[in-house]
Amino acid sequence: MERKGRYGKYGGQYVSETLMGALIELQTAYERIKKDRNFARELTSLQGEYAGRETPLTFCPNASRELGCRIYLKREDLVHGGSHKLNNTLGQALLAKRMGKKRLIAETGAGQHGVATAIVGAALGLPVEVYMGEVDTKRQALNVYRMELMGARVIPVKSGTRTLKDAINEALRDWVANVRDTHYLIGSVVGPHPFPLMVRDFQSVIGREARRQVMKKEDRLPDTIVACVGGGSNAMGIFYPFVKDDVELIGVEAGGEGIDTGKHSATLCAGEAGVLHGTLSYLLQDANGQVLPTHSISAGLDYPGVGPEHSMLKDSGRVTYTAVNDPDVLGAFRFLSRNEGIIPALESAHAVAWVMKNADRFDRDDIVVINLSGRGDKDVAEVAALEGRI
Amino acid sequence: MGRIETVFANLDRPAFIGFTVAGDPDRETSIRAALALIEGGTDILELGIPFSDPVADGPTIQKADERAIAAGTTVDTVFEIVRTLRKKTGVPVVFLAYYNMIYHRGIDRFYREARDAGVDGILIADMPVEESDDVFETALHYGIDPIFLITQTTSDDRIRKIAARAHGYLYLVAVLGVTGVRDTVSAGAIDLLQRVRKQTKVPLALGFGISTPDHAKICSDAGADGVIVGSAIVDIVGRNVGDPAAMERELKSYVARMKKDL
Ligand SMILES: Cc1ncc(COP(=O)(O)O)c(C=O)c1O
């Protein structure tokens, strides 16, 4: 039988039968709007007028001097809502509206995707319910308030490990029960086909802009592009338009307390192929095939799976996946704040940390683009608490 | 003829299909639960393989999976349970699994070991027919019935595709949603039964939400070839943790009551 949405051996649609109708409907609708000029126009207009695109590609003179190469940041932290997540939620919400869906549901870890979904729900007039692990509702209490302020209902998830993976389980269970009128707005390049494809397409605006911008500023492509990888959407978004070029691509996972401690979320570095949330991809699992609990200082990377396209890119060697640990991430968080006056999200700080640790690989003229997927305002309370300041 | 086919061929009433999670709350007790279900009159036994992320299941079965995993249940344990049961009963055993448990062990190895243990059918909750090429061929190779789900959102076109691969029985999902006890059997479930009936002669069993003799009777009157009960049984197991004798008594009398009007 014809299999949909494959990336090499990865991907697919491993879902309950109840959802197959909805996935086929979504696939068809997505293929239709991809060719629809009006849809593209409407999305571009919202991206500009509402979301604040295009985002700058900022040259960082101080960090460049410190690290000995030409460092640029792709400023997704300046997208409305504070992260790249809105690129995807705008696209999917517009699509859901076209499909006549009456309700949006989403999962969230750090709260950034939940916030981005709450934003589009308010802006486009769709009710939003967000599943969030109970542990995360406490870690990210302010984001719960933000979502509620914008009219979304946040449902704390008390099953399993009470974090992002369980929030996705609960959102899938909701979707099965309400599939006829509800769109599940998944927040990364994970889940069953067509989500990995669709989310990558909506996030690719990052890479397309970055390409134009770096050509304009430097008259050549960058040497290296670095992005953090949780589910993998900001990374796929910036990598995809460069995949066929001679540009080094580095995906940085959450090494947590160190891969050998078991307390990490470095799926591509330490996992093996498995099936979770509708897709075949690398997965952190134990010897018996049970999914493992994860750890990261950044809730947004705290996920045992990863997008299937990344799994293919790892196996083919086109992208290098690596991990950095929590202390280096905190170092990068402070480094960028102090040197450039830009507070990065802890997720994005993983990408910065990798460049800092690998600075001696680069020459003065090498161009390194870091995808600054989000701003760190959401994290300052947690870091201050870690430092014993509050 | 396989054991499952024989059950349906020899019955002049709908089959009672009972589900319990293997290893819930521990290996020994779950064997006692399975045997009590069979003694009470269960025609086909469905055994759930516990998984950390059972997305098709409601809270009752999620908790059973958690209990089983906490007790150290692995796929090895599940095969041991089947081997133990096989020494005592010829009732067909069907696995309900999430695909990762099979994929992780290796598809061929899993089905071979299942056949050796005496498993008759395997249903994978997160395996739509479109993805089933490998497991379908492997199942047939080892003489195991690949069992598929059909739901109220399955189109007629896809029902045809699924029916073409159906062996043993087709599992018709009576609700729009996850497993768990419901108040009624919906009109949608009966419509589904009639819709699928037009397309296949394979036995049709209704499951999800069914818990009372009244529910069973509605399914039976509508012409179902089997009724499947999961959460109501798992609930009895869960309520009697620590008192296996009481669990056995309750399971036996429950199955007998459910079967009375079938
Ligand atoms: C700022 C930021 N960056 C990155 C991520 C990780 O997601 P992804 O890997 O899909 O980009 C998140 C997720 O919450 C995030 O908030």
Image (cartoon, grey):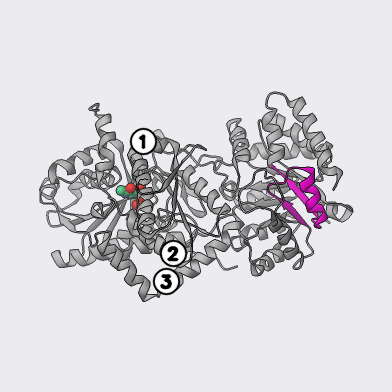
Contact, CB < 8 Å: mark 3 with mark 1?
no
Q: Residue at point 25% right, 28% down?
A: A390
Q: Name the outermost residue toward the top.
A: B242
**First of labels 3, 2 by sequence position:** 3
Disc 3 and disc 1 on one polypeptide chain: yes
On-image quarter of the N terminus of chain B: bottom right
Classify residue A121 by image quadrant. bottom left
- Residue corresponding to mark 1: A139
| Left-right relation of A79 to B46 | left
- Residue corresponding to mark 3: A33
Residue interval drawn in magenta: B204-230
Label 1 is found on which chain of the structure?
A: A
Tag 3: amino acid: Ile
Classify residue B187 by image quadrant. bottom right
SS at circle 2:
helix
In percent of width and height, residue A137 lies at 40, 38
Q: In this view, does A350 lie above or below B133?
A: above
Query: In the depicted view, which residue is nearer to us: A127 or B165?
Result: A127
Q: Residues within 10 Å of mark 1 (few under 14, many from 20)?
A: some
Q: Is residue A233 above or below residue B41?
A: below
